[in-house]
Image (spheres, helix red, strand yellow):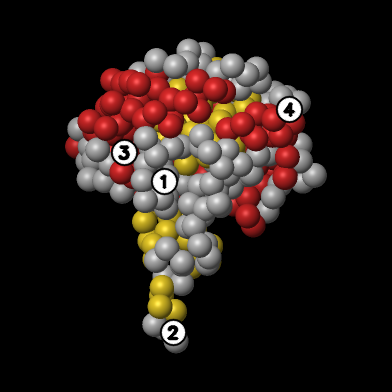
Amino acid sequence: MVDLSITLAGLKLKNPVLTASGTFGYAEEYADFVNLSRLGGVVTKSITKEPRAGNPPLRVTEVPGGMLNSIGLANVGVEAFVKDKLPFLRKTRTRVIVNIAGNSVEDYAAVVARLDQEEGIDAYEINLSCPNVKEGGLTFGKNPAEVFRMTQHIRLHTKRPLIVKLTPNVTSIGDLAQAAVDGGADILSAINTVVGMAVDVKTRKPILGKITGGFSGPALKSIALAKVFEVARRVTVPIIGVGGIFSAEDVLEFLLVGAHAVQIGTANFIDPAVSETIVNDLQTLCEDQGIEAVKDLIGRLEIQERAVLFG
């Protein structure tokens, strides 16, 4: 039997497969399709201090190689989350990671402080990289000094594992990774979506209501692999790889370049049961390759140093 377990900064997962924020609701929506207890963990939609209605339509459109979204962090707000969503999540028998967003450092800290009063939460993922909101998101996430300041402040409000989600929409994601770790992040997740847009040539208007959105899907995988590889060579904390993961083979690619775990995102919209399928396929794939423990693959990419682009 292959050992699929992974440990992230003291947080043990039964396997390295998690769901990505914004693609799996509050988990309850998928309970009829997926055995949630088979997953390494679930990451909730972003939770903000107050409820958010999100951006005007159209908010999602399919494009070659993936999809664009401009949801705008629509969510029920922290108090409704505690009252209506958290009771179900406590029963899932998997790790529960709550994604946090806000318009200011005080907003982020307030949500973390409120949730820290509640049982049933294993870690927080701090969203400093959403491209679909005017305030917060990339406003903070593209500046290493701001990433350091935000992480350091949020760190004061919890002892639970703190994950900072990094944007690829910068020149050097390694600088952001270092800033987050210096600020107190225990784990990093990379990457969030890439800014993109689509145009209706008949109306000559942008298809998305907010003009631009976050591009995700299969075409993002190569970018995400390179970014995770860059981050893994810069810092020593565990990394959760995100971006275009649709199969067990994709999971192995991310582990080899340095990720400790992965999140499944856009694939959930195509097949709601894909995360559980990937866990099962990962077991078989490792057995076929004679791999005894999946953790042994982390960072085991074989390369010639002279070919490495990131030093």
Q: Position of residue 306 (x, y in %)?
A: 19, 37
The amino acid sitting under disc 1 is Cys
* Front in this rendered view, residue 261 or 296: 261
Q: Quadrant of residue 177?
A: top left
- Identified by mark 4, the residue type is Pro
Q: Position of residue 82 (x, y in %)?
A: 65, 29
Q: CA distance from mark 3 to mark 2?
A: 34 Å
- Residue at the image position 37 percent from the left and 41 percent from the top: 136
The numbered mark, 4 or 1, whose residue comes first in the sequence reads 4
Q: Is residue 29 visible?
A: yes
Q: State how far apart marks 3 and 1 are (Cα).
A: 10 Å
Which residue, given by chain and number where applicable, does mark 1 sit on? 130
Q: Disc 2 or 1, which lies upstream in sequence?
A: 1
- Tell me the element at label 4: helix
- Between marks 4 and 3, how big is the CA–CA gap? 31 Å
- What residue is shown with label 2? 203
Tag 2: amino acid: Thr
Q: Which residue is mark 3?
A: 140
Q: Is residue 163 visible?
A: no
Amino acid type, mark 3: Phe
Alpha-carbon span between mark 4 and mark 1:
27 Å
Residue 139 quadrant: top left
Q: Secondary structure at mark 1?
A: loop
